[in-house]
Image (cartoon, grey):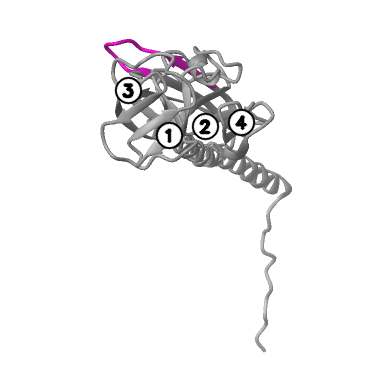
Amino acid sequence: MSKVIFRNKKGFTLVELIIVIVLLGIVSFLGVNLLLPIMTGYTDTKVKDLLYNEAKFITERMAKELKYAIPNTVADFNNSCQPKNSNNIKFASFKDVYFYTKNEKDNISLTENVSINNYDILSIYVTKCNQFYNEQRVYSVTDNDSGNYLILDKNLKKDSPYKRVFLFDKVIAYKLLNNQLYWCNGNIDTDFNSEGNCYIFGNFLDSVEFTYDAGNRWRNAAVKISLTLKKNDVSINYEKVVHIRNTP
């Protein structure tokens, strides 16, 4: 009769189990410490891309609008004509620019036939921002002859040596409020601290600074836009200089 003999197989000893557990712990610890920076770096890169694209969108939109600023109308909300590191800024935008000849004290003739309506607002030879916001050199059309011969609501304060007249559109403003950048529009006398049609223009703004350089006869004016955007623990700095016309 054949016999089946069972032999006892040797198992892991307690010491071997402890060694295996320790080795697994070491491997896991090293793996986590190797992967964590990689995952964190990937996440930070995605956040930086988000912030960069937000900053680029904001500044490109501003640059496009600043190209239509009536010369020398850039100011902060306190009507300072030289904003420096300000978290708000405003300027008057124009619909079009024409050339004129002066007839009498309160009327001008445009050098081309255009569509100018009664009560349209004109800006003529503004050399400082307060001349615009105090409406010293801002005029309302009271009568026109086919859009060419214009009668103004008051005498010309100063005749433009360049014979340029800007057709006013609206005042555009940007301001920082609760880590969001707001785009606003209004009239010449709008107080953008509390008034104006305002909409959220950008997010993740930790700080915004506008600095205006009025330029001179040989170089254009410039607005420097400095942004700091932050999300979680990731932040970026972004700067753009926009050159704008300064010949009224």
Residue 233 is marked as 4
Judge depth for marks 1 and 4 and give the one in front. Answer: 1
Proximity of marks 2 and 1: CB atoms separated by less than 8 Å: yes
The magenta stretch spans which residues? 209-221
The kind of residue tagged 3 is Asn
Residue 88 point in image, percent of width and height: 57, 23
The quarter of the picture where the N terminus appears is bottom right
Residues at marks 4 and 2 touching, judged by CB atoms closer than 8 Å: no
Whole-angstrom CA distance, mark 1 to mark 3, is 33 Å
Q: Is residue 218 magenta?
A: yes
> Where is residue 150, by image quadrant?
top left
* Residue wearing tag 1: 65
For residue 33, which quarter of the picture? top right
User: What amino acid is found at the position of numbered circle 2 in the picture?
Assistant: Ile
Mark nearest the camera among 4 and 2 is 2
Relative placement, left or right, of 18 versus 103 is: right
> In the rendered image of this protein, does residue 144 appear above or below residue 107?
below
Percent x, y for residue 201?
56, 38
Q: Nearer the viewer, residue 63 or 191?
A: 191
Of pointers 2 and 1, the one earlier in the residue sequence = 1
Q: Residue at x 44, y 35 (%)?
A: 143
32 or 191, which is in the foreground?
191
Q: Are marks 3 and 4 in contact (CB under 8 Å)?
A: no
- Name which of mark 3 and mark 4 comes first in the sequence: 3
